[in-house]
Amino acid sequence: MSDLKGRTAVVTGGGTGIGLACARRLAEMGVETILMGRQLDRLEDAAKTIAGARAIRCDVTDEDSVAEAFAAAGAIDILVNNAGIAAAAAFHKTPMADWQKIQAVNVDGLVRCSQAVIGPMLTADYARIINIASIAGLRGGAYVAPYTASKHAVVGLTKSLSLEYARTRLTVNAVCPGYVETQIVENAIANIMAKTGRSRDEAIAELAKTNPQGKLIQAEEVAEAVAWLCSPLSGSVSGQAITISGGAI
Ligand code: NAP
């Protein structure tokens, strides 16, 4: 994998799960990583485990917080829009506030962070935006309509921005994982157990069934795709939504 020494990346939601795995993998490639999220203690603990990493508090739903965080971050070559939340409920019983909460993080937050970095990227010799969407960004899903809609928006934004900036060196891509073994999936397992009375193993099997390979994905597998999209030789790849889902499309 090409050396990215001297490049700087922001990973939102970089203190846990997929974001943390991305930050670790990028650091291995020589990238200085900045972990952003709301829980500063957790981010700082994570940053201590990654060479050259920094932690900056940022709530992607808060305009001032995003402005302050990106001002503190300085020049950015790579933005991994990873911060995201999920919830499962019957659509007709979903309060508007719950719908808006998901869009505020998964869509508006991603827009805000992207707008904070894109200006200087348009004249740079290298720039990457990678959006962590989901397989839910490519197909429908029962009981997860707000999340599914938010991830479809992420894929749509990715395709549009890739075209809008095609004459620059900025590429914009999405990765679309199936169920990955992280806190989000831990919450889904707990939800299935509570709502259906199934055991933990049965709940995991239910989620793994959505993957033709019959397993949960690992965060490091998602990070590997992100690392490849960041490599200089992937500069002709843009507007893609790459599935990491054991063959589910
Ligand atoms: P996770 O460990 O729960 O990570 C979510 C991260 O988002 C946390 O680090 C959290 O940090 C951050 N976050 C949430 N709200 C935020 C806000 N308002 N401002 C800033 N940061 C915020 O779960 P994960 O699975 O790694 O999720 C990462 C991404 O992968 C999400 O976009 C998710 O939709 C996507 N994804 C996950 C799966 C899966 O099965 N796990 C599958 C497909 C896609 P703080 O609490 O510190 O803010």
Image (cartoon, helix red, strand yellow):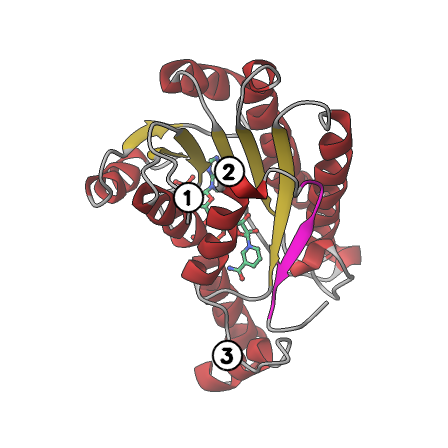
- The answer to whether residue 81 is visible is no
- The answer to whether residue 180 is visible is yes
What range of the chain is rendered magenta?
238-245
Residue at 78% across / 62% down in the picture? 140
Q: CA distance from mark 2 to mark 3?
A: 38 Å
Q: Which mark is residue 232?
A: 2
Residue labelled 1 has its Cβ within 8 Å of some atom of ligand 1: no
Q: Nearer the viewer, residue 77 or 206?
A: 77
Does 28 sit left or right of 85 as displayed?
left
Query: Which residue in the rendered view is the most extreme toward the left?
Result: 48
Question: Which residue has dot 1 on it?
Answer: 2
Q: Amino acid at mark 2?
A: Pro
Does 119 sit left or right of 76 as displayed?
right
Residue 237 horizontal/vertical position (percent): 65, 43
Residue at 41% across / 20% down in the picture? 69
Q: Amino acid at mark 3?
A: Ile
Please say whether residue 243 is one of the residues in the magenta stretch: yes
Question: Which residue has dot 3 on it?
Answer: 204
Identify the secondary structure beneath mark 3: helix
Check the image and report above or below for 53 versus 72: below
Q: Amino acid at mark 1?
A: Ser
